[in-house]
Amino acid sequence: MKKEIKETILIEKPEKHVIKCTLNRPEAANAFNSVMAEELFLFFESLSLDQKSIRVIILTGSGKKSFCAGGDLKERNGMTSDQWFKQHKLYERMVRSIINCPLPIIAAINGVAYGGGCELVSAVDFAYAAEHAIFAQTETKLGIIPGAGGTQNLPRAIGKQRALELILTGKTFSAAEAKEWGLINELFSSDNLLTEVTKVANLIALNAPIAVKQAKFAINKGGHMPLSEALSLEIEAYNKTVHTKDRTEGILAFNEKRLPKFKGK
């Protein structure tokens, strides 16, 4: 397994077409500071510009206690308003690079996901969690509001009323509740979490890469449109798959009763 160790994140390639990004500040509960925000932005931006052989991204945290505790409040202690605004621009770029990434992103929530960490959960395409994971949008307890997509992505994931309750109270909620409300797709034991997430990533990676990206695009973009416009968008996305070699290969493999060999062309 290839590894690329940066200052705050660890990049690995556990499978041929799968890349894993691990938030790697266990001493700070994997909270993101300015360096991590910049490194995450550069990582996701690079995959948006050039996917190479990568078809699926897994996002997780190091250790078994914390996925991400949000913004590093020790780094923020004593910041002036101007310094705060400047740093938050990094956070904004980071989360937008995740939301706009054309590749599927699966999060493996291995522990605490508070504040900005919870915002990351609602920003990815879908997520699985360890049974002991705990979530919270704690920003109103600190005199701010979720500013990395939380007020927009969380209501879209679990509904307006539930999101309002969680954001306005700042209270914690369990992994079981997160699954019941639709923020998390499935729960696994801590030991099995990454194994199961990697299985799902491999299932996606077996499918035609262009089709997968176009399906993600149509779902994410069309979900904010009136149905008539969304259906037109769907056809545009569909048509981009028709002329591909992968479409020809998929039909041929079906008729020859074999697994297709998709190349993303």
Image (cartoon, grey):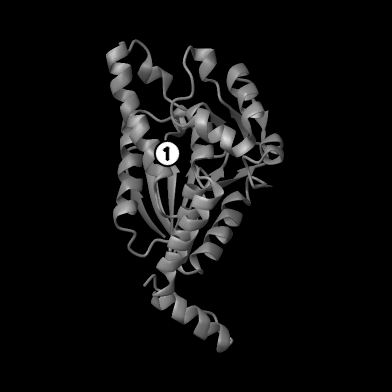
Residue 52 against residue 26 in the figure, above or below: below
Give the camera-side residue of 210 and 204.
Answer: 210
Q: Tell me what residue is drawn at x 50 percent, y 49 percent.
A: 222
Q: Tell me what residue is drawn at x 56 percent, y 25 percent.
A: 137
Amino acid identity at mark 1: Asn
Left of 153 or right of it: where is 55?
left
Q: Which of the 4 quarters of the picture holds residue 83?
A: top left
Q: Tell me what residue is drawn at x 36 percent, y 28 percent.
A: 33
Q: Give the quarter of the figure containing the C terminus.
A: bottom left
Q: Give the quarter of the figure containing the N terminus.
A: bottom left
Left of 134 or right of it: where is 61?
left
Q: Which of the 4 quarters of the picture holds residue 86?
A: top left
In this view of the protein, can residue 1 be seen by the observer? yes
Q: Which of the 4 quarters of the picture holds residue 114?
A: top right
Residue 242 against residue 134 in the figure, above or below: below
Residue 175 against residue 253 in the figure, above or below: above
Q: Tell me what residue is drawn at x 30 percent, y 50 percent.
A: 46
Find residue 20 and report its horizontal and vertical position in percent. Answer: 44, 52
Left of 92 or right of it: where is 233?
right
Q: Residues within 10 Å of mark 1 (few under 14, many from 20)?
A: many
Residue behind mark 1:
24
Residue lying furthest bottom in this view? 256
| Secondary structure under the numbered disc 1 in the rendered image | loop
Find residue 44 and report its horizontal and vertical position in percent. Answer: 36, 47
In this view of the protein, can residue 65 be seen by the observer? no
Give the camera-side residue of 50 and 68.
Answer: 50
Give the camera-side residue of 49 and 216.
Answer: 216
Give the camera-side residue of 169 and 192.
Answer: 169
Find residue 158 and report its horizontal and vertical position in percent. Answer: 63, 36
Find residue 228 and report its horizontal and vertical position in percent. Answer: 53, 52
Residue 252 against residue 132 in the figure, above or below: below
